[in-house]
Image (cartoon, grey):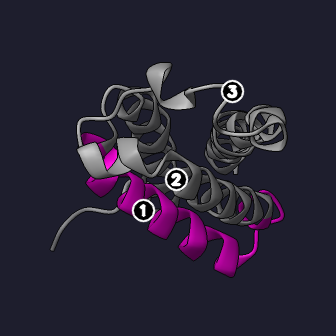
Amino acid sequence: MKKYKLASILMIIHGAFMEIGGCLFLIPVLVMGTDKYDVGQYFSFIVPYFQENLYLMMIAGMIYGIIRVVGAIGLLKNKMWGLVLSVINCVITIALMTFMLPAGIMDGILSCSALVLILIQYFGNKEIG
């Protein structure tokens, strides 16, 4: 159970601070208007579509962060749905992290670490075959 707790903490840090926190810090820019600040000049993504639609990326990031935190809380409370939701979140993040470079590097570190901890705890010392 110790590894589940550590994986949950990693996912809460990832979801709350990186995903949700990052989106919340950009709300004042949205309120003041997009013509005053070009937020895209401070963030760069390897895929131009993401760069051009940064505000849509913020909304998607907020939703993704909320789902990540919900899964982490479920895992922290030893719920099977939390385990499955956390594994799904980690796998999707690993698949998408290359499109989010350079920010995807930190996503990958946190998600891969959480997934490895979850899998080690779940499967333990079981052998193949």
Tell me where residue 105 sits by quadrant.
top left
Q: How far across and how far down the image is residue 67, in percent?
A: 68, 66
Q: Amino acid at mark 1?
A: Phe
Q: Residue furthest top?
A: 42
- Residue stretch rendered in magenta on the structure: 74-99
* Mark with earlier residue (1, 2): 2
Q: Which residue is mark 2?
A: 57
Give yes or no for residue 95 being in the magenta stretch: yes
Residue at left offset 50%, top offset 62%: 89
Q: How far across and how far down the image is residue 11, in percent?
A: 64, 45
- For marks 1 and 3, give the one nearer the viewer: 3
Q: Quadrant of the C terminus?
A: bottom left
Tell me where residue 84 sits by quadrant.
bottom right
* 1 and 2 marks in contact (CB < 8 Å): no
Q: Which residue is mark 1?
A: 123
Considering the whole magenta stretch, tell me its main secondary structure. Answer: helix
Give the Cα separation between the discs numbered 1 and 2.
35 Å
Asked if residue 127 lies left or right of residue 30, the reply is left
* Mark with earlier residue (1, 3): 3
Q: Amino acid at mark 2?
A: Met
- For marks 1 and 2, give the one nearer the viewer: 2
Asked if residue 54 lies left or right of residue 59, the reply is left
* Mark with earlier residue (3, 2): 3
Q: Which residue is mark 3?
A: 36
Residue at left offset 27%, top offset 56%: 95
- For marks 3 and 2, give the one nearer the viewer: 3
Tell me where residue 51 sits by quadrant.
top left
Q: Secondary structure at mark 3?
A: loop
Residue at left offset 38%, top offset 46%: 52
Q: Residue furthest front?
A: 35
Q: Secondary structure at mark 1?
A: helix
Give the Cα separation between the discs numbered 1 and 3.
52 Å
